[in-house]
Amino acid sequence: MNPTVVKISDLKVHYPIRKGFFSFGKPQTLKAVDGISFELKEGEILGLVGESGCGKSSLGRAIIRLVDATSGKVDIQGIDFLALKGKALKAKRPQIQMIFQDPYASLDPRMTVFDILAEPVKAHMKLSSKELEERIKKYLELVNLPVKALKKYPHEFSGGQRQRICIARALILEPKIVVADEPVSALDVSVQAQILNLLKDIQQKLNLTMIFISHNLSVVKYISDRIAVMYLGKIVEIGSRQDIFASPRHPYTQALISAVPIPDPKTERNRVRVPLIGEIPSPINPPSGCTFHTRCPFAVAHCKEAIPRLENVAQNPAWQVSCWEANLV
Amino acid sequence: MKPILEIKNFQAHFHTRRGIVKAVDDISYQILPGETLGIVGESGSGKSVSQLSYLRLLPSPPLKIVGGEVLFHGKDLLKMTAEELRQVRGNKISMIFQEPMTSLNPYMKVGTQLIEPLLIHRGHSQEEAWKKGILELKRVGISDPEKAMSKYPHEFSGGMRQRVMIAMALTTDPELLIADEPTTALDVTVQAQILDILKNIQKQTKMAILLITHDLGVIAGLADHVVVMYAGRVFEKGTAADIFEKSQHPYSRALLKSTPRIDAIQTQLPVIAGTIPDLSKLPPGCPFYDRCENRMDICRSVFPPKKAIDPGHETYCYAEMSR
């Protein structure tokens, strides 16, 4: 069994909402992430799925400290990353890096590829200029870009190539953990497969631990070992890829999977969907009890009153679901 | 059955400072009354631009219609005067756009913009139109439609706004609905709801739907016929079964194979090498040449002529593919 690399416990990200400029009333809170816990083993890819507004990006950003968590812990090899400050924080930062969705917006248009890749190295390591160049070339090669790319600017590249640059930038400090937030969502289908395969290859080569955030379940299924399904700031089901896709237990997971169109007319036209009513409610005033009860086709009276907790499915601690009506056998 | 819309050898180019961008290059296809025609393609394939250009929704210049015919009930839309086209556009041909956030006017009440087509094309009174508007909102599954009419777009979620867009497009009972990526900005569960609404309304009204999308799954669920486009060209057309099960074009095949699927365990995705070409620097031959696994010398110099596989199933490729 691989060792645990990250342990996230009861992580919360609450944003205060003020209505109007002079409002002195009670400030409301938007609970983007509301008590999330999970562990990641070395070399594992966890797919984080959910619809827009479920808090998946806030969770990713809180883990890497791009937004401040309200409470909770992110233990990276026994050290609480969220409690670090100053030099200790800087020393730890190279271990956890991020790849963003939009490769057009996440590269500085005025920097050459060399400068883009050199920036994190210069900030965190003392290398001679020759060592720096060698390192940059090594990572350029890792993402299959030619050396002549170094003198070019981001606008000279296509979306897929830019995402390769972003990947190289995230990996050049040899992180243990990479948070990839919708890394292929902005790409065309024919380019998406290239980047997915590249991420998968690199992950295996470097034994990276990865959190892969996406709204696209087909993509998540392809790349992940384990899947966590989020709804209104909470994990409603987490388990291995095999378990989640073969026999999802949470009605929301079932609905999500059944709503993804399959590119095969015969299969697609004969599918039975788990129908969902309406859309995701506002996280400012989430529904009582199980927050999913307003859309759930199986909700009973109890679901409105009591909040379900994550419980093991089939006595398997690696597969958990939070639903009063779910089959746990 | 006579086609409702027939596009013949249509060409539309952009004249820019960087040169001529051949956004739509000699495309032909047709759509029959009551059917759904799916147009698939990646960015820059010309799938949207072709519709926008014959409906004259793009500024010209830079757009220049170079040639071809676009026949709606046998009448060439390209030869109509602006006034004649206005009688068709938004009336017999309606359109839904991808971004429900930006295609509604934030300063106007939903009801006011919803009934505009009725006031303009049908000469309804304000009161009549408002009543019809309420029915339209009901039809697309908006609860409490009376109240919704008096709200502003920002009070709605993305899915609700897209419902409003659909309702607006349907107020005049169009014969052809052009849906340009209608669900791309939406979550999958909402996408399923919206696609169901479109299917049900089509069953009732028998309107034709021209569905533009990059999502092969959406096409598989809805389309009777499919057109595959790439870099301004039509590569293949046929029934949904022709394209999904016995495609004869290397691009359509590769695109299908490289799509991650929820109903399969894929260990390694086959990829299409390279990237989508720059439309202002297209080679004379087939624009897929650089990325194609079946390429031959002739592909580089001359775009392949039409090849009929079965009745209605046509490809534009020199290669003989295994069946």
Image: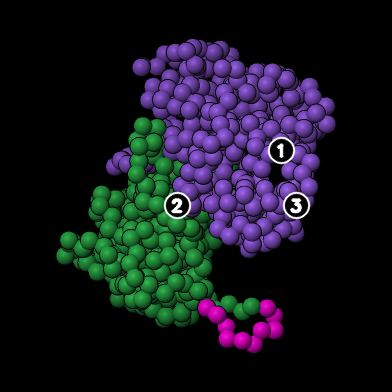
Chain A on-screen colour: green
Please report contact status of discs 3 and 1: CB closer than 8 Å, yes or no.
no
User: Is tag 1's residue or tag 2's residue first in the polypeptide sequence?
Assistant: 1
**Which residue carries the number 2 mark?**
B189
Q: Main secondary structure of the magenta part?
A: loop
One can see residue B250 in this view: no
Chain B on-screen colour: purple
What distance separates the C-alpha of mark 3 from that of mark 1? 20 Å
**Which residue carries the number 1 mark?**
B90
- Of badges 2 and 3, the one in the foreground is 3
- Of badges 3 and 1, the one in the foreground is 3
A240 or B51: nearer the viewer: B51
Q: Is residue A23 rendered magenta in the image? A: yes
* Residue depicted at 51% across the width and 54% down the height: A101
Secondary structure under badge 1? Answer: loop
Q: Is residue B125 left or right of residue B294?
A: right
- Which amino acid type is shown beneath numbered disc 1? Gly
